[in-house]
Image (cartoon, rainbow, N blue to C red):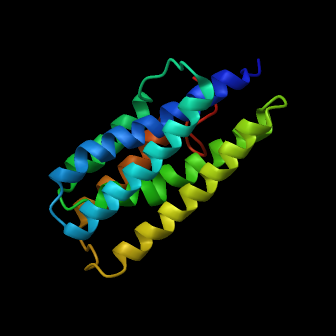
């Protein structure tokens, strides 16, 4: 059964909210200044997307997306510098969110406003991925097998939850 426009929008909103909450809470706990700033900026960007979508929906009923929250919190716990959570956003979560946004636009039933909001959100997602790359390029490379294993586990967690390609378009 195809989800309704509202169900799709609420699911996407849950993704935004989860990112906003976890990154916003974690930024002040990180130790690398460049990553602290980038994490705050990413949180703010997704918070703005959430606000815009929430205003469009009126009274949405959403909570954090459990698997996404788990992956982001694992990334924060696994590396106090902030590199792992930003890696997660740029390489694990961001690409899956882009696919979800595309799938959401394609599944909508005649809602031009939601379609435009999802299209704009795709551009924000790409911008945040690129900004993370820009922040990371001036940092020392991470040559740590444990860190690399944690990075792979983040992707595996989403894969095992059925989110190998996207975060879905409904719960």
- Residue 58 appears in the picture as rendered: yes
- Residue 170 appears in the picture as rendered: no
Q: List x then y, in percent, for residue 30.
A: 18, 56
Looking at the image, which residue is at 55% across and 55% down?
A: 125
Is residue 82 shown left or right of residue 97?
Answer: left
Is residue 64 shown left or right of residue 32?
Answer: right
Near-viewer residue (85 or 126):
126
- The count of marks equals 0
Q: Which residue is outermost to the right?
A: 110
Q: Relative to 120, say whether 167 is above or below.
A: above
Looking at the image, which residue is at 38% across and 48% down?
A: 154
Q: Which image quadrant is residue 70 in?
A: top left
Looking at the image, which residue is at 49% across and 37% down?
A: 51
Which part of the image, by quadrant, shows the N terminus?
top right
Looking at the image, which residue is at 47% across and 59% down?
A: 91
Q: Relative to 146, say whether 96 is above or below.
A: above
Near-viewer residue (166 or 56):
56
Q: List x then y, in percent, for residue 170.
A: 62, 26
Which part of the image, by quadrant, shows the C terminus?
top right
Q: List x then y, in percent, for residue 163.
A: 55, 38
Q: Which image quadrant is residue 136 in?
A: bottom left
Q: List x then y, in percent, for residue 2.
A: 76, 22
Is residue 153 shown left or right of residue 80?
Answer: right
């Amino acid at each position: 059964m195809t989800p309704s426009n509202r169900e799709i929008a609420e699911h996407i909103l849950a993704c935004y909210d989860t990112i906003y909450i976890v990154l916003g809470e974690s930024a002040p706990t990180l130790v690398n200044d460049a990553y602290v700033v980038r994490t705050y900026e990413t949180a703010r960007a997704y918070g703005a997307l959430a606000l815009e979508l929430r205003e469009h929906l009126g009274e949405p009923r959403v909570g954090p997306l459990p698997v996404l929250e788990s992956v982001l919190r694992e990334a924060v716990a696994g590396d106090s510098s902030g590199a792992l959570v930003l890696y997660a956003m740029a390489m694990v979560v961001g690409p899956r969110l882009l696919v979800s946004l595309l799938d959401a636009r394609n599944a909508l039933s005649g809602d031009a406003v939601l379609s435009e909001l999802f299209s704009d959100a795709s551009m924000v997602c790409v911008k945040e991925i690129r900004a993370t790359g820009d922040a990371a390029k001036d940092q020392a490379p991470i040559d740590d097998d444990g860190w690399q294993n944690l990075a792979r586990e983040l992707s595996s967690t989403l894969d095992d939850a059925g989110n190998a390609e996207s975060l879905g378009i409904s719960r």
